[in-house]
Image (cartoon, helix red, strand yellow):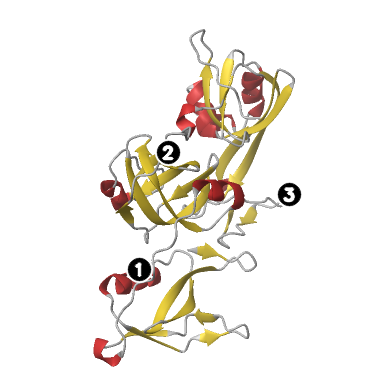
Amino acid sequence: MQESKSTKNLYFDIQLQTGKDETQSVRVMVQRGESSKRQLFLNKLQTQQPIKLSNLQVTPSNMVFLNKGTAIQDAPSHSLQFPFQPLASTTSTSVDTILKTHNNGNFTVSGCIKWLGEPLKPENATKMVREAELTDPSGTINLSVWDSHMQQIEDGQFYTVTNCKLKHYFGKRLATTVTTTVTKAKEQDISHVERSQDKQNWLCCPEVMNVYPTVYPVCNNKDCRKKISENPGSKIVHCLHCNRAMLLKNCYIEININFHLEKQEKTFSVTAFPKIIGNFLQEDVLQYKDNITDLTEKLLLLENVDFQLSPNNKLVIGMKTHTTSSITVKVNS
């Protein structure tokens, strides 16, 4: 599922086989919260059921759209003069290429998968996810494995994983999608690759030069939860992402903390999310939403604290009290 940058409309693309060696790309427009249309096409793909689409719209650029007025009907198999032909498997993209040259998109990757933890259900999610790390000869990248794909993967084995979506959460990571397939792959030589788990990027006891906690409202639509821009003096706000209106007092509240850290004359401007700060302080950070001064004071008084940074040194992904037995890992420059 994609979102148009200009109109904010949601859509997904399908490849419709129209002949033995012919395909037609069709862009399917959907309403927010609607999942039945996408599931319908996934079911047709799985059962190889031919379909007939009527009243499609074609733009001057020859882009074919499926909108509300399009009729979708089953077609008898004998009405087609060609057999179903699956799309050729996509060539794998190296981890190094994804990390260095891409910021979004779907990719097929192949490498060794190692689990980083046990399965869990994220807040507001309906399915389980398990975090892993995929390593190929060019590098490593985190991989979020959702739902039934978890049962297809054995720790430390090589797999080809198709149609993974590139996301940004504590750095770049891939996530399986409903159209992902997991298949066994040939072993690769990854003995020279240093796993990200082995270089944890800790910043040992930096000086907290200043902090800037930001409190902001987010959309109370649980399927959205995007940041909302307030209009000064207005009691009603509009979410530009899902187009819903709501009372400002009924919005959810989020807090981000921007740190300016200094270590050996090097400075780091980083952002920490409430969960990271809350886990370290052993308290709910959101309780400070109406009294941000107390939280600011607590953070400015932090001493002998190690900060774990994301690979790009932009996010705080862990904090711990420094001990003499702590292993200091050099932070990426």
Residues under labels 2 and 1: Cα distance?
38 Å
| Mark in front: 3 vs 1 | 1
Q: Position of residue 186 (x, y in %)?
A: 33, 49
Q: Amino acid at mark 3?
A: Pro
Tell which of 219 and 275 is nearer to you.
275
Residues under labels 3 and 1: Cα distance?
42 Å
Left or right for 1, reference 273: left
Q: Position of residue 124 (x, y in %)?
A: 41, 47
- Secondary structure under tag 1 reads helix
Tell which of 191 and 107 is nearer to you.
191
Residue at point 38%, 53% (across, down):
161
Neighbours of disc 3 within 10 Å: few (<14), some (14-19), many (20+): few
Residue for badge 3: 232
Neighbours of disc 1 within 10 Å: few (<14), some (14-19), many (20+): few
Q: Is residue 233 above or below residue 194?
A: below
Q: Amino acid at mark 1?
A: Gln
Q: Amino acid at mark 2?
A: Ile
Q: Position of residue 329 (x, y in %)?
A: 55, 21
Residue at point 38%, 35% (across, down):
116
Neighbours of disc 2 within 10 Å: few (<14), some (14-19), many (20+): some
Tell which of 310 and 196 is nearer to you.
196
Residue at point 39%, 66% (across, down):
35
Question: First in sequence: mark 2 or mark 3?
Answer: 2
- Secondary structure under tag 2 reads loop
Residue for badge 1: 39
Residue for badge 2: 190
Residues under labels 2 and 3: Cα distance?
55 Å
